[in-house]
Amino acid sequence: MPIRRRARAETSDAADLVRRLGKLLDEFRLTEAEVTVGDMRVRVQRAVAPVASAPAAPAPAAGTGVTDPVVIVERPGSMVTVEAPMVGTFYRASSPTADPYVREGDVVKEGQIVCIIEAMKLMNEIEAKAAGRVVKILVENGQAVEYGQPMFLIEPAR
């Protein structure tokens, strides 16, 4: 099977798996589900709504205490994962009006800044662990991240 067709098939398989896991989350009122199929790991999780939320944030449905699901699809066999080295807030750019440090599809060098994590009012620059192409950005701008949480998937340069 040509590479393009295989990539489309894998994407389709991942999307189907995500849909099925989403239905299970709803059906059993789960906050997280994870499945590994071959070299692909899919995790669907609902972010728990904060106790004291800002007025601008949309409220979750009554009685659920959860917001929209977060989907993480990883292929760790050939990819390098850039993980959060600390708890904080993820930012793709140095300021709200600046261009993001990287976009999906960009080629990065080892040590190149890929994002910022704000922790305790300090802006910490996070660097790429390997040279290669950014395949997937797993975190939304302004989202809270936890220690060890995957943020980027990088296909290493050969």
Image: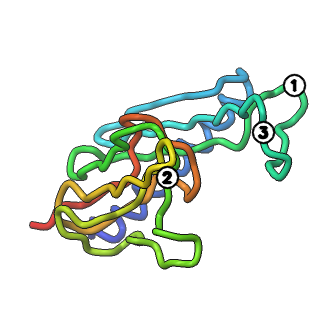
Q: Name the element at disc 1.
A: loop
Asked if residue 110 lies left or right of residue 146, the reply is left
Q: Name the element at disc 2.
A: strand
Asked if residue 126 lies left or right of residue 151, the reply is left
Quadrant of residue 53 within the rendered picture: top right
Q: Determine the residue positioned at 84% across, 41% down.
A: 59
Quadrant of residue 102 within the rendered picture: bottom left
Characterize the local packing of mark 2: few (<14), some (14-19) or many (20 or more) Cα atoms within 10 angstroms.
many
Provide the residue designation for mark 1: 63
> Disc 2 residue type?
Phe
Mark carried by residue 90: 2
Between residue 79 and residue 37, name the one nearer to us: 79
Q: Name the element at disc 3.
A: loop
Q: Determine the residue positioned at 86% across, 36% down.
A: 61
Mark carried by residue 53: 3
Q: Do callouts 2 and 1 mark residues in contact (Cβ within 8 Å)?
A: no
Q: Quadrant of the C terminus?
A: bottom left
Q: Determine the residue positioned at 65% across, 41% down.
A: 69
Q: Where residue 113 sits: x, y (%)?
A: 30, 65
Asked if residue 19 lies left or right of residue 76, the reply is right
Choose mark 3 or mark 1, whichever is in front. 3
> Disc 3 residue type?
Ser
Q: How is the image coloured?
A: rainbow
Dot placed on the residue nearer the N-terminal end, 3 or 2: 3
Quadrant of residue 62 within the rendered picture: top right
Dot placed on the residue nearer the N-terminal end, 3 or 1: 3
Q: Where residue 116 sits: x, y (%)?
A: 42, 57
> Disc 1 residue type?
Gly
